[in-house]
Amino acid sequence: MNLVLLTEEDFQQGNLVSLTGERAEHIIKTIRVKIGDSLTVGLINNLMGIGIVTELSNTTVTLCVELNSQAPTPLPVRLILALPRPKVLRRTIAACSSFGIKEFVLINSYRVEKSYWNSPLLQPEQLNKHLTLGLEQAKDTILPSIRLAKRFKPFVEDELSSLLESSKGIVAHPYADDHCPKNTSGHITLAVGPEGGFIPYEIDKLAEAGFQSISLGPRILKVETAIPFLLGKLL
């Protein structure tokens, strides 16, 4: 935890914050603060700053908080991701949140197991938990948005074209002829399929919506490996 992420409900009086639960336990047992120590803090979807420890018990930490700095600049990327298995999704959204991606769309694909859509992880509070882990890691306060698109064809045909009006559409596909471009300018809408890629029908529909298919080479990469590789080359 490189940043203590706060909510409006944490503020008890003025600029005093009282923390209990997992955050307090981490501050007390892992960071091992003392009264007078300072911590980097941030208010969700708001400013960042410093919190000075003013009171300390076995279960509670009280901070005097001053918020005076902006969150880091977001990454100019919208990620459209074929829903992976839950344990991969947890790691992926936490990592992408730490990269600074602020908009996710989880979509269906022929190669996505139907059972994945029944995972408790897709509940908003669970998704936000893992997005928050990424924010705490990267010292960021702006919570990303995630939407679920369970039907591939209606989403691609009815919504994708409008999303690309001010964004360049790129789909990672292992069998594409074009290699991944470097140092791409402007906003990118990046689509990443399941391991093995989208099926040809899905690639064709994405192309109709305005997406360019690109390849990272002959190796088939796992989703959580391919995304940082793509971001590093594109940006």
Image (cartoon, rainbow, N blue to C red):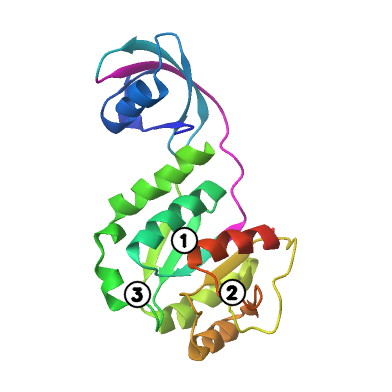
Q: Nearer the viewer, mark 3 or mark 2?
A: 2
Secondary structure type for disc 2? strand
At x 64%, y 66%, the residue is: 166
Label 2, on which residue? Answer: 172
Secondary structure under badge 3? loop
In the picture, the quarter occupied by the N terminus is: top left
Indicate which disc, 3 or 2, sits on the residue closer to the N terminus: 3
Q: Which residue is mark 1?
A: 104
- The answer, for residue 141, to whether it is visible in the render is no
| Residue at numbered disc 3 | 150
Q: Is residue 215 visible?
A: yes
- Amino acid residing under circle 1: Phe
Tell me the CA gap for discs 3 and 1. 14 Å
- Image check: 47 left or right of 130? right
Up-down relation of residue 129 to residue 203 (above or below): above
Structural distance between the alpha carbons of marks 3 and 2: 20 Å
The amino acid sitting under disc 2 is: Ala
